[in-house]
Amino acid sequence: MSLSRDPDLDGLELVVVPVTAFGQNCSILWDPGSRHAVVVDPGGDVPRLLHELASRDLTVDAILLTHGHLDHAGGADALRAELSGRQGAAVPVIGPDARDAFLLSDIAAQAARYGLEGMRDVTVDRFVTDNEILPLLGRSFEVRHVPGHTPGHVVFYDPRARFACVGDTLFRGSVGRTDFPYGDGPQLIKAITDRLLPLGDDVSILPGHGGLTTIGAERHGNPFLI
């Protein structure tokens, strides 16, 4: 996928693989020295993700989920099973916040309503909590709870790289949908204001759909935040 600009991840590499009919940004982040990686939001198209990983000779340490929607989590169970078998050790699925458990257990039904196949419910190895630190790839990824799009939506932020995978919270020129029964527009704007904007204008963010942007670009130009 071509991004608006290549982020400087201070030693990490990034490839973004659009998956599912929704064009969701599945992210593969890795350390080029160790060849260890994490996969963020594998919504589907698992054979393609396995090819991307194998072509780079990557070992996946964890699968991270920002929230429970099918286009972000629908391939997590299958990817975990395939990678655990290939690598000879269990690959954990980590996140989101436990308040999205009801969505993770309804993925297959969600997919059926859209006429999509191959998506599974997923039982995560563990949920995450706000302000938790995840030691991965020799980094300390911060977990930030940013609800509103879904109740348990989280963001994964690498302060060393000044980079965050923000899922469906903040987009280039827009914000996540809140017209679900469990959505909350004012809560989402408040969470973006309180939990994302303070990261700093230079922080690059990868949304769940569309191109890369920065906190500064959205602070000053996003109509939902002005």
Image (cartoon, helix red, strand yellow):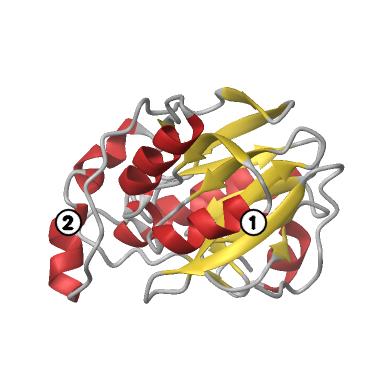
Residue 186 position, x and y percent, is 41, 56
Observer able to see residue 148: yes
Residue 66 position, x and y percent, is 46, 46
Identify the amino acid type marked 1.
Answer: Ser
Q: Which quarter of the figure has residue 16?
A: bottom right
Judge by depth and name the residue closer to the eye, 95 or 147. Answer: 95
Q: How many marks?
A: 2
Indicate which disc, 2 or 1, sits on the residue closer to the N terminus: 1
Whether 66 is drawn above or below 131: the answer is: below
Return the residue at label 2: 108
In the rendered image, the quadrant that contains the N terminus is bottom right
Judge by depth and name the residue closer to the eye, 135 or 128. Answer: 135
Residue 103 position, x and y percent, is 23, 48
Identify the amino acid type marked 2.
Answer: Ala
Mark 2, other Cα within 10 Å: few <14 / some 14–19 / many ≥20:
some
Whether 88 is drawn above or below 49: the answer is: above
Badge 1 element: helix
Whether 193 is drawn above or below 210: the answer is: above
**Viewed as shown, does residue 171 lie left or right of 46?**
right
Residue 176 position, x and y percent, is 45, 64
Instruction: Name the residue at 64% across, 40% down.
Output: 37
Return the residue at label 1: 55
Distance from label 2 to label 1 (Cα)? Answer: 29 Å
Instruction: Name the residue at 39% across, 43% down.
Output: 82
Q: Which is more foreground, mark 2 or mark 1?
A: 1
**Viewed as shown, does residue 43 lie left or right of 169?**
left
In the rendered image, the quadrant that contains the C terminus is bottom right
